[in-house]
Image: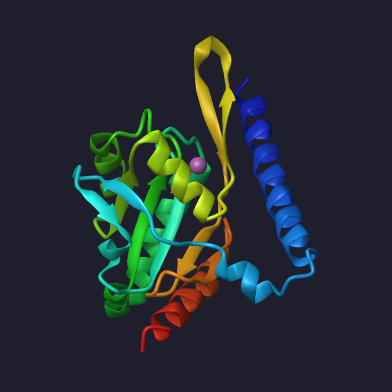
């Protein structure tokens, strides 16, 4: 049963990758310039941080930022990604202060600020957990073009399928690039260093 679960999650990851790739391909096939498409990712948002305070894009203090979407009950992708993000932050050293980091819940029903706070702090005190009302979360999911879907499990339980990429955003909130799930740590840190450079 456990083995089956791992295989099932492996398939989910592969499927998400395929969906993401297809979406990218569809975007690049619409005839519009890819820069314009990229510019469509992001935008202003209104959420609640893991201390229960209202937050918007000004939370990053005019710094470029790395933002990731997930949920605390995630069995694999989210803990792995947050663990890796904590590692990148450490490798960046002093430069890590020049960026903001956020983990946005796609499961606001279960991810209250308190739940998020404990979860995110277990990985890094630099990553800000963000949640909000169903509507607030739906809004940022839409503006960031994130894929997130509730998947029913046995006994009335559910899990979430969601985009596994980390979005890299410039200080003005416009899209810079992504770090893929499982990206080589050196490449990931280089991407973050490039993101730091967009600020100067
Ligand atoms: Ni996840």
Residue at x-position 75% and y-position 66%: 28
Give the mark count: 0
Write down the quadrant of residue 153 in the picture: top right
Q: 159 and 61: which one is in front?
A: 61
Residue 89 placement (x, y as % from top left):
35, 67
Residue 70 makes an appearance in the image: no
Residue 198 placement (x, y as % from top left):
43, 84
Asked if residue 133 lies left or right of residue 27, the reply is left
The quadrant of the picture occupied by the N terminus is top right
Residue 39 placement (x, y as % from top left):
56, 70
Q: 52 and 156: which one is in front?
A: 52
- The correct choice, above or below, for 91 with respect to 84 in the image is below
Residue at x-position 37% and y-position 28%: 110
Write down the quadrant of residue 60 in the picture: bottom left
Residue 75 placement (x, y as % from top left):
49, 35
- Which residue reaches farthest bottom? 200
- Which residue reaches farthest top? 155
Asked if residue 107 lies left or right of residue 34, the reply is left
- The correct choice, above or below, for 153 with respect to 142 in the image is above
Asked if residue 71 lies left or right of residue 1, the reply is left
The quadrant of the picture occupied by the C terminus is bottom left
- The correct choice, above or below, for 71 with respect to 87 in the image is above
Residue at x-position 49% and y-position 78%: 190
Residue 143 makes an appearance in the image: yes
Residue at x-position 35% and y-position 61%: 101
Q: 97 and 55: which one is in front?
A: 55
User: Which color scheme is applied?
Assistant: rainbow
């Amino acid at each position: 049963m456990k083995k089956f679960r791992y295989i099932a999650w492996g398939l989910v990851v592969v499927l998400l990758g395929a969906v993401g790739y297809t979406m990218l391909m569809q975007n690049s096939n619409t005839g519009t310039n890819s820069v314009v498409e990229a510019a469509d990712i992001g935008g202003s948002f209104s959420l609640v941080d893991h201390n229960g305070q209202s937050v918007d894009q000004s939370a990053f203090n005019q710094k470029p930022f790395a933002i990731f979407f997930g949920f605390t009950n995630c069995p694999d992708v989210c803990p792995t990604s947050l663990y890796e993000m904590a590692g990148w932050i450490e490798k960046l050293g002093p430069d890590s202060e020049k960026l903001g980091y956020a983990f946005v819940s796609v499961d606001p029903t279960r991810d209250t600020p308190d739940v998020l706070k404990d979860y995110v702090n277990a990985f890094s005190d630099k990553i800000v957990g963000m949640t909000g009302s169903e509507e607030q979360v739906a809004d940022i999911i839409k503006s960031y073009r994130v894929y997130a879907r509730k998947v029913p499990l046995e006994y009335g339980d559910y899990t979430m399928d969601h985009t596994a990429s980390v979005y890299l955003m410039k200080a003005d909130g416009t899209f810079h690039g992504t770090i893929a799930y499982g990206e080589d740590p050196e490449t990931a840190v280089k991407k973050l260093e490039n993101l730091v450079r967009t600020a100067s």
